[in-house]
Amino acid sequence: MPSPTSRRFSHGALTVHQIPCLKDNYAFLLRDEETGDVAVVDTPEAGPILALADDLGWRIGTILNTHWHADHTGGNEEIKAAHGARIVGPAAEGDRIPGRDEAVSEGNEVRVGNLRAAVIATPGHTRGHITYHFESVGVLFPGDTLFSLGCGRLFEGTPEEMWSSLSKIRALPDETVAYPAHEYTVSNAKFALGIDPGNAALRDRAAEAERQRAAGEPTLPVRLGAEKAQNPFLRADDPGLAVAVGLEGSPPAQVFAEARRRKDQA
């Protein structure tokens, strides 16, 4: 039987197992139910991923990395050695992806069995960060670009790049189910409410997240439609948010930058 710490979600032909790793990371074990082909999105650590694959009797054929950080690639080489997995990662991050076999950029597709994922360039957190969008089943793996009620820190990119990346994600259909890579919803909610206290949908989401964590449940995945209404980092072009951060009439990238600066200092 699967590890009790993982959660299984079904999206038509795509099954996703959400695996807690390290302190607050998730890895995502995917299976195309039509072909039985298996992939994993990001590998914070090999142990939990390999244990679940063994429990399920699944052989991992592909590793899909979103960016080079060790808490997303740390299990690459061990999983590759154990399962013979092909490692796919962003072309813009060169040899920083351990064991990478295939480099991809925006406009490319990757396949898990019969399922195709579009590669979307989403720099900001890192300069080469990418996101995987399985449009046919409405599923998105944004890595550290989008979190529930938040977004990634700008370690390598600029506010303009990150706002552009988040705008690409925001343009996807509301019903898209997103699987962010970290369990940050409760802390993100506290910050978001500080700059957007009148947002009723955000208040409801914050209360729901508190209940979920108190019950030992993950707050993820999330639907993009909800994030568009609740997440301040997706709403930097909202005049009300600009007023809230003291930048009435300013360009969205500037409003985003100020919100991100405040979050970094929170």
Image: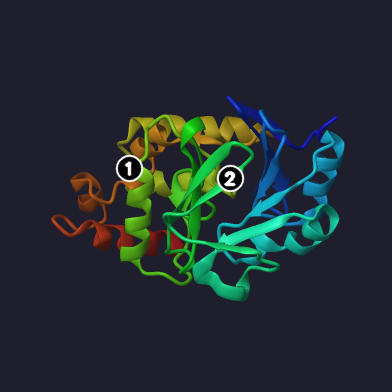
Residue name at image x 33 percent, y 40 percent:
197
Q: Say what secondary structure mark 2 lies in.
A: strand
Compared to residue 38, the image places residue 86 above or below, namely below
Which one is nearer the viewer's eye here, 20 or 217? Answer: 20
Q: Residue at 42% across / 29% down in the picture?
A: 175
> Three-letter amino acid code at disc 2?
Arg
How many numbered markers are drawn?
A: 2
Q: Residues within 10 Å of mark 2 (few under 14, many from 20)?
A: some
Task: Describe the element under mark 1 as helix, strand or loop.
Answer: loop
| Number of the label disc, if any, that sits on residue 41 | none
Q: Position of residue 145 (x, y in %)?
A: 47, 55
**Residue type at mark 1?**
Ala
Q: Quadrant of the N terminus?
A: top right
Work out whether 210 lies above or below 73.
above
Point out residue 182 in the picture as x, y percentages from the top left corner: 59, 50
Left or right: 258, with 57 as reference point: left
In the foreground, 49 or 98: 98
Report the Cα–Cα distance between label 1 and label 2. 23 Å
Q: Give the side of residue 151 with respect to residue 12, left or right.
A: left
Tell me which corner region of the image, top left, top right, bottom left or bottom right, holds residue 162: bottom left
Residue placed under numbered mark 1 in the picture: 171
Which image quarter: residue 73? bottom right
Q: Which residue is mark 2?
A: 111
Q: List x then y, in percent, for residue 84.
A: 79, 55
